[in-house]
Image (cartoon, helix red, strand yellow):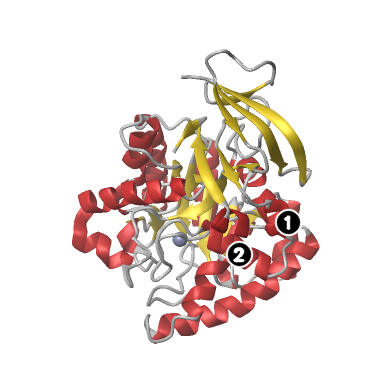
Amino acid sequence: MAELYLKNANVVDVRSKTIREGQCLLVKDGKYAECAEIPADAQVIDCNGKYVSPGLIDAHVHLVWDGRSPDPMTDTVVDGDFVSFARGVENALLTLKAGVTYTRDVGSCHDTAFPLAESINRGIVPGCRIIPCGGAIQGSYGHCPMIGTICDTEAELIAKIKQLKAMYVKHKIAGPHWIKIMASGGAAGLEDVGPCMYSPKELETIAYEAHRLNMKVAAHALSFDAISKCVEAGIDTIEHGAEMTPEILQHMKDHGQTWVPTLGVYKMLAESRGVVADIIVDKSEIVTIKQKASFAQAMEMGTNIIMGSDAGSANFGPHPSGLIEMLAMEDYGMPKDEVLWRATVHSAETLGIKNYGAIEPGFTADFVILNMNPLTEGVAAYMNGLEQVFKGGEPV
Ligand SMILES: [Zn+2]
């Protein structure tokens, strides 16, 4: 691989939230190297007046779903796994092209995200990097059975978790390893949102078994019943989390647990009356009001938050949706430079992705060239000022 040399770059330091002006950047074997003289055979890019910023990390996507559809869940059943896989290929490329270079896929039909991640890692198809949680584990009375695996007993839960670990090995996904469970009903479904779908003992079994095998657990949880039981059981990330309370937020802070609020998707569903079913709009309106209040509270209390969009959800639009989510985070009062930090290196560190999400020696060179400053302009710089995307130092 030829070396890449960027000169006169305004490098965005997402940790310190400052710009390092007029820098040179050397990319060697896909990673940032200490900058010295320009290597003789290096490809040189003059970044004068441009900003070099890390690729974004979306911690909550569904690549087999097409968010342009009013019912992507049913589509996966009607279309079958092969077409769903092909859709995942298309969506992973769309995601990468927009500057979202790493994703955690938290639900795919028949564990399709595993072969998808492997195909991308092997260079068979181009696309964003993926942590493939596989099918979301859920009970018979669950949220999205079409992208899930039904496990009703503790024995079934333990067997499925072991099977998912084996999938990570089989598909040569180095890590980090995550699984996803559906702990409550959802807004985009016809089931009750309220009851926790697993008992505290079952949730503890899930957390124990996953952690024992060096995996972490993401839980879809909207209701107080589900969220409170999940955080007590030691689940690592709470997805959506509408009914947060100060006690839950404090518990999460004290135990190093993270909230992935997916604000944008509920905001959009709440504004989709006439396009999606009324029952979904009604539920989303309630979620949106609760989320907005909890988000402000979490920021004040210092509960950990990372960016996750739920890309692929009904009527959410084409992949990726991480930019829409960042816009919602800004809209709900988080400073723009903090949103960028939470959508890059902080997300990488929370998810356990080593050496991604920042422009530092030894880190993987997943970055974008922007003609706007993302620290001051926020996500608008990625939306309107994106000039080029690089993955592992290679132009996309
Ligand atoms: Zn989701």
Q: Considering depth in this image, is 133 or 117 the residue closer to the camera?
A: 117
Residue 376 tag number: 1
User: Which quarter of the figure is the C terminus placed in?
Assistant: top left
Mark 1 surroundings: few (<14), some (14-19) or many (≥20) residues within 10 A: some
Q: Callout 2, which amino acid?
A: Leu
Indicate the position of residue 86 as horizontal and vertical percent values.
26, 48
* Image quarter for ligand 1: bottom left
Kindly check if marks 2 and 1 are in contact, taking CB atoms under 8 A apart as contact. no
Q: Considering depth in this image, is 144 or 157 the residue closer to the camera?
A: 144
Q: Residue at the spot x=53%, y=35% of the render?
A: 214
| Residue depth check, mark 2 versus mark 1: number of the one nearer the observer | 1
Mark 2 surroundings: few (<14), some (14-19) or many (≥20) residues within 10 A: many
- In the figure, is residue 193 to the left or right of 363? left
Instruction: Compare marks 2 and 1 and give the one earlier in the sequence.
Output: 2
Above or below 46: residue 384: below
Q: Considering depth in this image, is 3 or 60 the residue closer to the camera?
A: 3
Indicate the position of residue 126 as horizontal and vertical percent values.
37, 38
Q: Callout 1, which amino acid?
A: Thr
Check disc 1 and report its element: helix, strand or loop: helix
Task: Decide if residue 318 is in sight here.
Answer: yes
Above or below 123: residue 69: below
Q: Residue at the spot x=43%, y=80% of the render?
A: 280
Residue 327 tag number: 2
Q: Considering depth in this image, is 210 or 296 the residue closer to the camera?
A: 296
